[in-house]
Image: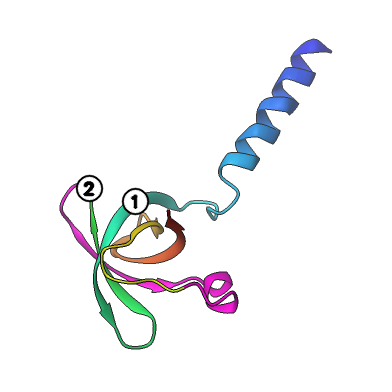
Amino acid sequence: MEAYKASFFSLLVYKYEYFMVHQGSVEKEGVVKEALPNTLFRVELADGSIVLCHLAGKMRIHFIKILPGDKVRIEMTPYDTGKGRITYRVR
């Protein structure tokens, strides 16, 4: 029974830490380099690659503004690493 409680607790912690990432997505951090029309942005990741990202729906609804130079968290699918979705602006 103790093993069940421990695994359930670790599952809750796991879900709490990664609640914004969709299943099968990869989450990375980068810096916005350029703002493009229609809430598109060019983001440079830590490894130096440039990713074309759009703003997530929740960020549009809550009018969160993204400017060049902001540090952001993006999520990408492993199938297309050239595109992503901005899910969080790091303060």
Closer to the chain start, of discs 1 and 2, is: 1
Residue at point 39% right, 81% down? 39
Label 2 SS: loop
Q: Which label was assigned to residue 46?
A: 2
Residue 70, image quadrant: bottom left
Other residues around mark 2 within 10 Å, as few (<14) / some (14–19) / many (≥20) = few
Residue at point 15% right, 52% down? 48
Residue at point 58% right, 40% down? 17
Task: Kindly identify which residue carries mark 1.
Answer: 29
Q: Residue furthest top?
A: 2
Q: Residue furthest bottom?
A: 37
Residue at point 42% right, 66% down? 85
Q: How far across and how far down the image is residue 45, in percent?
A: 24, 54
* Magenta run includes residue 2: no
Label 1 SS: strand
- The quarter of the image holding the N terminus is top right
Q: Residue furthest right?
A: 1
Vertical relation: 26 (above or below) 87: above
* Magenta run includes residue 57: yes
Q: Amino acid at mark 2?
A: Ala
Other residues around mark 1 within 10 Å, as few (<14) / some (14–19) / many (≥20) = some
Vertical relation: 84 (above or below) 46: below
Q: Amino acid at mark 1?
A: Glu
Front residue of this view, candidates 67 and 48: 67
Q: Which residues are magenta?
A: 47-64
Mark 1–mark 2 contact, CB under 8 Å? yes
Vertical relation: 83 (above or below) 18: below
